Amino acid sequence: MFLHVKNIYKKFAHAEVLKGISFSMEQGQALTIIGSSGSGKTTLLRCLNFLETPDSGQIDLKGKCIYDAERDRNCSDVQLRNKRLHFGMVFQQFNLFPQYTALRNLTLAPELLQLERAPRNEQSAIKKKIDEAGRDLLIRVGLADKMDAYPYQLSGGQQQRVAIARALALNPDILCFDEPTSALDPELTGEVLKVIKDLKNEHTTMIIVTHEMGFAEKVSDHVVFMAHGIIEEEGPPEKVFHNPESPLIRSFLQKEDFY
Amino acid sequence: MKHMFKEITLQLLQGFGENLTLFGLTLIMSMPLGLLICFGSMSRFQPLRWLARTYVWIIRGSPLLLQLFIVFYVPGLVFGAPMKNRMMAALVAFVINYSAYFSEIYRGGIESISVGQYEAGHVLSMKRSQVFMRIVLPQVIKRIMPPISNEIITLSKDTSLARVIAVAEVIMVAERFTAKGLVWPLFYTGVFFLLFSGFLTLLFGFIEKKLNYYRG
Ligand SMILES: Nc1ncnc2c1ncn2[C@@H]1O[C@H](COP(=O)(O)OP(=O)(O)OP(=O)(O)O)[C@@H](O)[C@H]1O
Ligand SMILES: [Mg+2]
């Protein structure tokens, strides 16, 4: 098992948002998470990226326990940074750095990370390599001509593609998307979804929270339906979308105009 | 007459040198100190936050003029060690005063940056210090340039308040002529302030333009 999430609980001041989430996935798979607003999808992704620390539960990756609430709930910043390296995150609001060009948005973090350890005489070679890798990534997401553009000069769809490339630049084991097209005009969602499909074809391991049901059905190997902080149902897309056990899914899909 | 004009100009210029010294030293010290106070006022440690905000309230809530008197007289009255260096007293009062104002400008700037920017940095495994220095601070600097320029121009004129504790700044020099029945040097000092604030305005215009290479 590539990723194994076990019994994650997360409580905020008054609300218990995640009430024992467990799931697992294989390398190269795309797992989509669907569910109505407030069911805890974003919170779950944030836990995987350690923007929130789960109150209890474990996360195993590649057979190794990378997070155990008992042990790591109060772990140091350095430890958190190491854990975060396993996961990439693409936000609904892109969150690009406005003061940097598209390319610099990609290269900043890898540079900071690698130069920290590198001896002085190798630094310019490393920078050059990171720069080239960044350019390749931008070409992959179809932005060869926007390397030097600032975020404000890009459309929403282009910004989100930069954000995807930025997350990929650190070679995460798993790339997470939190409603990557929800902030986009309908005519721009296609270009972002296409990039995600391409990544799927290249066997990038992905966890995608989305309200695009048609897309979820097509792209995912495994679908997780969340309701009120638990996993109400999961399985291959054919089952979850067309033959679900839980009546909650049917009413959810109706609301999402899936049928 | 021509000779007198030159003589008075030179003397006023010497006085304005004091204004510029006070201006420059105040900036160099109060801008970093303001950042420390700003961090204090945003700290998660409540007593520190309370302390920093009380400081800001007291300093912003009372006249700079009064603060000058207090810094000048209190050491002598309370500790029996009067301030000998008037410029030093003025500098201390100005640094205390301006650091409070700067800290509030910084705080406004920092709080205007969305949490998404921090989170984007964190998920990219950046250190907290890197997130602040590389992501947040550059954006804050751009956003606070207009209020900072405003504050700095205000400071350039406020330096003349130092005359209340007899720092020989330009207006005080001019008043010596007034006492001898010569009024125009007093009005003439305005030219010095105007030229200097004109220069500052151009400088900040230039910096703001430089920072305009991106939006957001
Ligand atoms: N930091 C927080 N403090 C308190 N409550 C929170 C916090 N973050 C999330 N919540 C609550 O947790 C619940 C789940 O939120 P979450 O954002 O995970 O839902 P979601 O499934 O992503 O919803 P949506 O589809 O609207 O994005 C909501 O009721 C929300 O109000
Ligand atoms: Mg959400």
Image (cartoon, coloured by chain):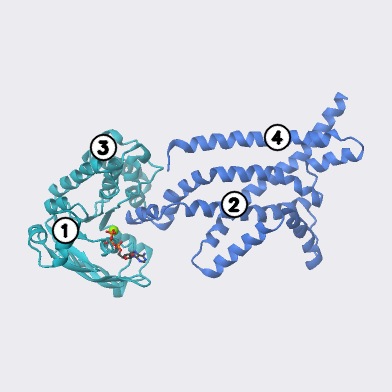
Q: Answer with the quadrant where ligand 1 appears in the image.
A: bottom left
Question: Which residue was labeled with disc 4?
Answer: B194
Residue A7: percent from the left, percent from the top? 22, 72
Number of the label disc, if any, that sits on residue B215: none
N-term mark: 1 or 3: 3
Q: Please, what is the three-letter code of the amino acid marked with disc 4?
A: Leu
The residues tagged by marks 4 and 2 sit, at their Cα atoms, a distance apart of: 23 Å
For the residues tagged 4 and 2, is the chain the same? yes
Q: Is residue B157 left or right of residue A23?
A: right
Residue B102's disc is 2
Secondary structure under tag 4 reads helix
What chain is tagged by disc 1?
A
Residue topped by disc 1: A253
Query: Are tags 3 and 2 found on a single chain?
Result: no
Residue carrying label 3: A143
Are discs 1 and 3 located on one and the same chain?
yes
Residue visible at 15% across and 54% down? A258
Q: x, y percentage for residue A161?
A: 26, 44
Q: Cβ–Cβ below 8 Å for labels 3 and 4?
A: no
Q: Amino acid at mark 2?
A: Phe
Within 10 Å of disc 2 (Cα), the crowding (few <14, some 14-19, many 20+) is many
- Image colour for chain A is cyan
Mark closer to the chain start, 4 or 2: 2
Question: How much space separates mark 2 and mark 1, taking CA atoms?
Answer: 53 Å
* Residue ID at (27%, 39%): A135
Rendering quarter of residue A57: bottom left
Q: Amino acid type of disc 1?
A: Leu
Residue in the image at 59% along x and 52% along y:
B102
Are the residues tagged 4 and 1 within 8 Å (C-beta)? no
Amino acid on which disc 3 is placed = Leu
